[in-house]
Image (cartoon, grey):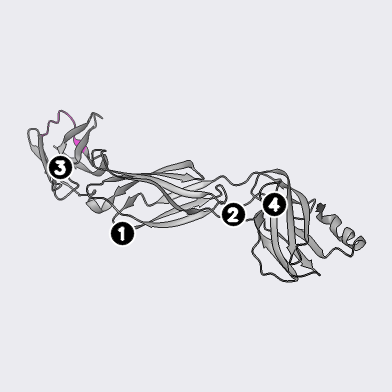
Amino acid sequence: MTIPANLIAGLLASSASHPISLSITAPLSGSTIANNTTAEAIAGVASSIAGNITALQYQIDGGSWNNFTFTAAASVSYSGGNAGQIGAGGHTVAVKATDAAANTLTVSSSYSITGSPPAPAYSWTPYYTYNGQNNYLTITHATANATVAYTQTQLDAHGNAVATLGMTTLGTTDVNGNFSHTGVASWTAGAWTDSVQLYVGGVQVGAYSFVNSSNNLYATPSYTPNTAPNGTQITLNFAGSWASSTVTQTMTFSPSGTVVGPTVLGFTDANGNFSSSQTMTWGTDTSCSIQVSLSGVSQGTYTFIP
């Protein structure tokens, strides 16, 4: 039997032989609450004259029954769950109490929610990681009590897979759909980037890329000499950078605005070394800016004059 909370007191007064007394104080029947970032706990008091209250459960909009956490006693103040953040409109929460003599009583409270719940947000940082470095996953306002998992593929500098990881579970979102996890970067030999897909409740909610910064992606190449009249050779050198990576450059001349590239100059060797020379041809321009990249990651911009 389900009895509205605002009628229970009168019914108990007219039926004093009922052993259980049960109330819902939040959300109050007829009340209106707002969707926000704070959980709206379901709360009230249950007591029995026939023995301790041994079970307390709640149900939202006729869904599954969920247990409150409490210590059995003749009179119990309960609080838990989340009556908010479940969508705007009318809702009903029911609470059921059971005592040691197997008596049960269920009461309900009808209320409404205004506005819309906050949009889910997902963050996994930092982008550049090295072996042993912490990375941080933060989820807010997602599906409540949902499994958080991910898949992973690590790639070499040419985009070939060197390591894969199937669906791996990290934990479960809380009743507000929030979750946080601190991981530790672990790179397979030869891996340069890491492609990660995030799943919440079995649904992909985001994709993230990480770059292995422990492999000297930023090699700070030298490009000399910066004063280079017509016919002068300029030389680009990498030392100890990422192995077998594509080296590209883009040249921008001024004041003409002529752009040459991006041009592939070649590839670093197995030790991450590289050297390339070219002859400067100026025409009427008075400066040249050259941006150098290693497998698509900018390594710096260099300025040359005739």
- Give the residue furthest to the front: 101
Residue at 30% across, 47% down: 211
Amino acid found under the numbered disc labelled 1: Gly
Residue at 67% across, 58% down: 41
Q: CA distance from mark 2 to mark 3?
A: 51 Å
Report the residue marked by disc 4.
59
> Which of pointers 1 and 2 indicates the residue nearer the eye?
2
Amino acid found under the numbered disc labelled 3: Thr
Report the residue marked by disc 2.
175
Q: Secondary structure at mark 3?
A: loop
Start-end of magenta stretch: 279-289
Query: In the drawing, what numbered circle is on residue 268?
Result: 3
Q: Give the percent coordinates (x, y) of residue 215.
A: 23, 51
Q: CA distance from mark 1 to mark 3?
A: 26 Å
* Residue 16 placement, left or right of 231: right
First of labels 2, 3 by sequence position: 2
Q: Give the percent coordinates (x, y) of residue 127.
A: 35, 49
- The correct choice, above or below, for 62 with respect to 66 in the image is above
Check whether the beta carbons of the residues at disc 3 and disc 4 lie within 8 A of each other: no
Report the residue marked by disc 1.
132
- Crowding near the residue tagged with mark 4, few <14, some 14–19, many ≥20 C-alpha atoms within 10 Å: some
